[in-house]
Amino acid sequence: DSGVTQTPKHLITATGQRVTLRCSPRSGDLSVYWYQQSLDQGLQFLIQYYNGEERAKGNILERFSAQQFPDLHSELNLSSLELGDSALYFCASSVEGTLPNNEQFFGPGTRLTVL
Amino acid sequence: QQQVKQSPQSLIVQKGGISIINCAYENTAFDYFPWYQQFPGKGPALLIAIRPDVSEKKEGRFTISFNKSAKQFSLHIMDSQPGDSATYFCAASMLVSNFGNEKLTFGTGTRLTIIP
């Protein structure tokens, strides 16, 4: 158990809908990362937050957005869903600021199925 | 320049044998190279990691070999066991002073199967 929790575990929805995925980082970790894992694209970085502020952006679609709250949990919002958005979404957290050890700990993921 | 290329895509090794997975990168600014292990239905978990100031790092049966000039690194699993059957991802990241690591760029994964 990595200490990172994600909810829900599974999500089934229809095209055009909007969903919110939630992540709670490990206690003490300030940085949260979101990744998308699909069969054809592998693990792709979406976005990173550090202590409430956006730190880095990757291959995140404009239909997707994220935020990190004062209690450090993070939410990934996916809107106008398309069939191709079906994937596993992982959240990871790291301590930051304790160089050189910045291991990212991954949560169990949320499996999103868009029908 | 942000790519990390991983091979092979799948690998079958007999129990007790050596499993070898290779990765190559292009961006010379990468300076942190972790390997992640992922079991079905689980998130990736850090297995072992190396920084480019050393050419090899060993932890138990797992060894990373790093060749900075060739921009390649590999994972060796000695005495492979059925419990090692999983998907392995190499990754690379850049260290940003005072802010820790940036995002991980992952390889495409290797599905390893250890047969009895």
Image (spheres, grey):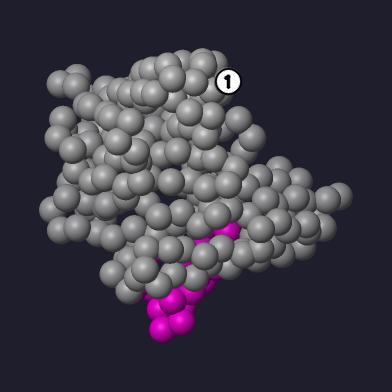
Residue B32 painted magenta: no
State left or right for residue A76 relative to residue B25.
left
Label 1 marks a residue whose chain is A
Q: Which residues are magenta?
A: B50-75
The answer to which quarter of the image holds residue B31 is bottom left
Tell me the amino acid under the disc marked 1: Leu
State left or right for residue A96 relative to residue B106.
left
Up-down: is A69 above or below B49? Answer: above
Picture residue at 22% right of the left edge, 36% below the top: A49
* Residue extending farthest bottom: B69
State left or right for residue B61 relative to residue A103.
right
Residue B79 appears anywhere in the view: no
Q: Tell me the quarter of the image containing the C terminus of chain A.
A: top right
Picture residue at 43% right of the left edge, 63% below the top: B3
The answer to which quarter of the image holds residue B78 is bottom right
Q: Residue B6: horizontal and vertical position, in percent?
A: 56, 63
* Residue extending farthest right: B116
Q: Residue B42: horizontal and vertical position, in percent?
A: 56, 32
State left or right for residue A93 relative to residue B67.
left
Residue B64 painted magenta: yes
Name the residue carrying label 1: A115
Residue B100 appears anywhere in the view: yes
In front of the other: A110 or B101: A110
Q: Residue B5: horizontal and vertical position, in percent?
A: 52, 65
Q: Residue A91: horizontal and vertical position, in percent?
A: 39, 32
The answer to which quarter of the image holds residue A52 is top left
Picture residue at 33% right of the left edge, 66% below the top: B30
The local secondary structure at tag 1 comes to loop
Picture residue at 50% right of the left edge, 40% below the top: A37
Badge 1 local density, few (<14 within 10 Å), some, or many (20+)?
A: few
